[in-house]
Amino acid sequence: MKVCVVGIGYIGLPTACLLASKGFHVLGVDINEDYVYRIKTNSLSIKEKNLKELLGKSLSNKSLILDIRPNRADVYIICTPTPLDKDNNPDLSYLVEGINSILPYLSKGNIVIIESTIPPKTTKEIVKPRIVSLGYEIGKDIYLAYCPERVLPGNILYELVHNNRIIGGCTENCSKKVKSLYKEFVEGEIYTTTAEIAEMVKLVENSYRDVTIALANEILIICNKLKIDPYEVISLANNHPRVNLPDFGIGVGGHCLPIDPYFIINSFPNSSKLLNTARNINNNMPDFIVSKIEKFLGKVKDPKIGVWGVSYKKNSSDIRNSPALDIVNILKDRGYDVKVYDPLIDGINYDKIKYESVEDSNFLILLVNHDEFFEEDYKEITRLMDRPIILDGANIFEKVSLPKNVEYYNLMNI
């Protein structure tokens, strides 16, 4: 069976490689010619676990080929991005371009799957009409479904196989056809429903997480005003059998949680006030953290600052919508001398960069709790600093001891 994956980014490329490893003949398509060349030559910097090896094998045995345009296939999977515009409205231009690119190659019996995150009713009102305009009947000639990805960066290949999946068919026949395809490589449960419900489920999953994190962040802010320990409040509250609060933090980043709630907010602005409030709380966390940092910067004239960790989460190289990076940019915009180090991000992950970030500095601010930061020799690091003051925004020194001459403050608990 021939599968064409349109959009071979962080979801499309692992999907294409996985399908190729399962015996499908896969064509991976991306409009960025330079990007396609780097994938073809396996020279792309890939952090995703086991993906580089699987890509090399798929290219070598030619189960995966790459191009900048689609071709004839039995199955088309659309994995294009859906970014937000400057007003936080979903930009569907990539999805539309992806759908339009496969229309000349469609034939009776084809399966078309949308995996991109999209607003409610997009499959029915934007994708379906384009296919129907060619004279095809959905559910008889073409089998169309919305099937959201539900994976965590860093473990995508495993989760594509083992996570439960939702098939949102435009008809019952569409759901049955697509489910039979997914059963070829998915070991988790597969649930069938309508396209509209599947679209909403994807948005609800990430909106739920955003709202609960906003609650935790609001509790942090209130506890700071009360001058009580937010860690103990959350920990003791979670002893209740029906309470499960997440950790608070410096904000919410990544490709999903800060984006997906806006797909609902944009479609139903008067009915999504809770989602909008949660977004505002989480968006404002970097400013809140900077306000706490600045209370300490006045201790030193012309402070020099080293910041460690700028990815959006621990043990990741992903900086998309990173609140840590927002904090760095706010500090720089206010004129502070800031040097940045992150062991997982290309360009700022060298030992030379690490030592330069703390040499003669007054402050070391830790914003992400990478595993590497728990193994550092802080006696050596603080020796390089001028009057070392450590501001911990990642609760690292709960488990790591510091030299006695170091001033230490937990940014979440002051």
Image (cartoon, rainbow, N blue to C red):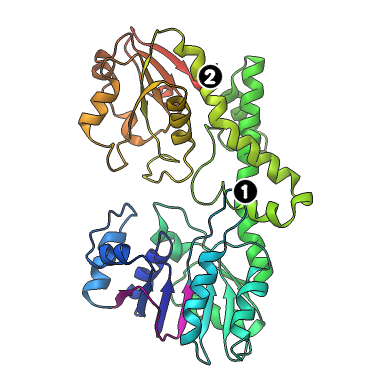
Q: Residue at x 64, y 55 (%)?
A: 263
Quadrant of residue 192 within the rendered picture: bottom right
236 inside magenta stretch: no
- Helix, strand or loop at label 1? It is loop
Q: CA distance from mark 2 to mark 1?
A: 29 Å
Above or below for 56 versus 1: above
* 181 on left or right of 50: right
- The quadrant in which the C terminus is found is top right
- The quadrant in which the N terminus is found is bottom left
* 359 on left or right of 185: left
Q: Residue at x 69, y 54 (%)?
A: 266
* 68 on left or right of 250: left
Residue 370: image location, x then y, percent: 37, 35
- Res. 115 in view: no
- Res. 229 in view: yes
Mark 1 crowdedness (10 Å alpha carbons): few <14, some 14-19, many ≥20: few
Q: Residue at x 78, y 51 (%)?
A: 271
Disc on res. 130:
none
The residue beneath circle 1 is: 87
The residue beneath circle 2 is: 292
Residue 292: image location, x then y, percent: 53, 19
Above or below for 241 versus 56: above
Mark 2 crowdedness (10 Å alpha carbons): few <14, some 14-19, many ≥20: some
- Helix, strand or loop at label 2? It is helix
Q: Residue at x 58, y 79 (%)?
A: 144
Residue type for callout 2 = Lys
Label pair 2/1, CB-CB below 8 angstroms: no
Quadrant of residue 28 within the rendered picture: bottom left
Residue 64: image location, x then y, percent: 31, 75
Q: Which residues are magenta?
A: 63-77
